[in-house]
Image (cartoon, rainbow, N blue to C red):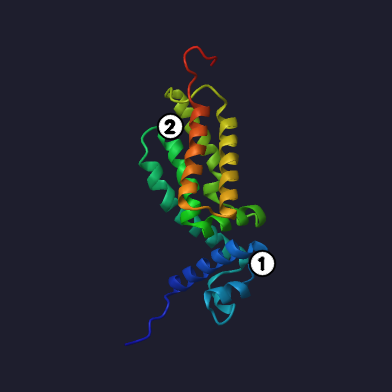
Amino acid sequence: MRARTFTESGRRAQIVRAAIEVIAEAGYAKASFSRIAKHAGLSSTGMISYHFAGKDDLLAACVTEIERVTGAFMQPRIDAAAGHVAQLRAYVEANVALVGEHPAEVRALIDLVKNAGSQSEAVNGRLALFEEHFRTGQAAGVFGRFDARTAALAFTTGLDAVVATAAANPPGPAELARLGRELADLYVRATAPASEGESA
């Protein structure tokens, strides 16, 4: 029986996985090729250079893989929610729960976006996505009267702060679920239409 060998794509994926884990553990600044190669069990950094044009190329692959993993976790939960309010809640709860399911990916993405200037379409596109969600929800009468862009900014920065804090020292699943639920409750209340007798 022939020994099993890595395919080209398999080796590339192995390197990306190792890079994500090294960045999550040590940070972008300390994620050298030698450290990544050692973590991946490679004999030399030459294998990394063979598969990637340079560090920027490797980091771009890391961001793409992180977006794939996080999207696969969050999107089905969002899609299963019916209506603007339910989808808002699903997004918040799924994003916080993501910390417990994929802590390395979350920590690595935070570090890459903050310290490496890496571009993440999923991260960069959220503001426009949430603003549009609030606008269409307002048109449907399920959200109150407020500036959609301001709300989107507050929503993303607040959520990011909670996720980053949790990712630094992940609590248990029950506490993460509580955090997600509490934050979602806060956003749902803040965006709800004014009750009768209240000022709009």
Mark 2, Cα crowd under 10 Å, few <14 / some 14-19 / many 20+, is: many
* Relative to 43, 84 lies left or right: left
Q: Which residue does the image show at 42% across and 24% down from the upper left?
A: 140
Can residue 49 be seen in this snapshot?
no
Residue topped by disc 1: 30
Residue 148 sits in which quadrant?
A: top right
Q: Which residue lies furthest to the left in this view?
A: 1
- Residue type (three-letter) at the residue carrying disc 2: Val
Q: What residue type is labelled 1?
A: Lys
**Element marked by disc 1:** helix
Q: Is mark 2 on a helix, strand or loop?
A: helix
Callout 1: few (<14), some (14-19), or many (20+) C-alpha neighbours within 10 Å?
few
The structure residue drawn at horizontal position 42% and vertical position 37%, both measured from the top left corner, is 87
Residue 145 point in image, percent of width and height = 53, 21
Q: Which of 57 and 129 is in front in this view?
A: 129
Q: In terms of depth relative to the viewer, which is nearer, 125 or 153?
A: 153
Residue sticking out furthest to the top: 197
Q: Position of residue 7 (x, y in %)?
A: 42, 75
Residue 94 sits above or below residue 189 on the image: below
Q: Residue under circle 2? A: 85
> Which of the two labelled residues, at mark 2 and mark 1, occupies the earlier sequence position?
1
Up/down of 31 relative to 174, above or below: below
* Among the 4 quarters of the image, the one containing residue 127: top right
Q: In this view, does 6 lie to the left or right of 33?
A: left
Against 51, is 127 above or below? above
Asked if labels 1 and 2 touch by Cβ distance under 8 angstroms, the answer is no
Look at 66% across and 67% down and name the residue there: 30
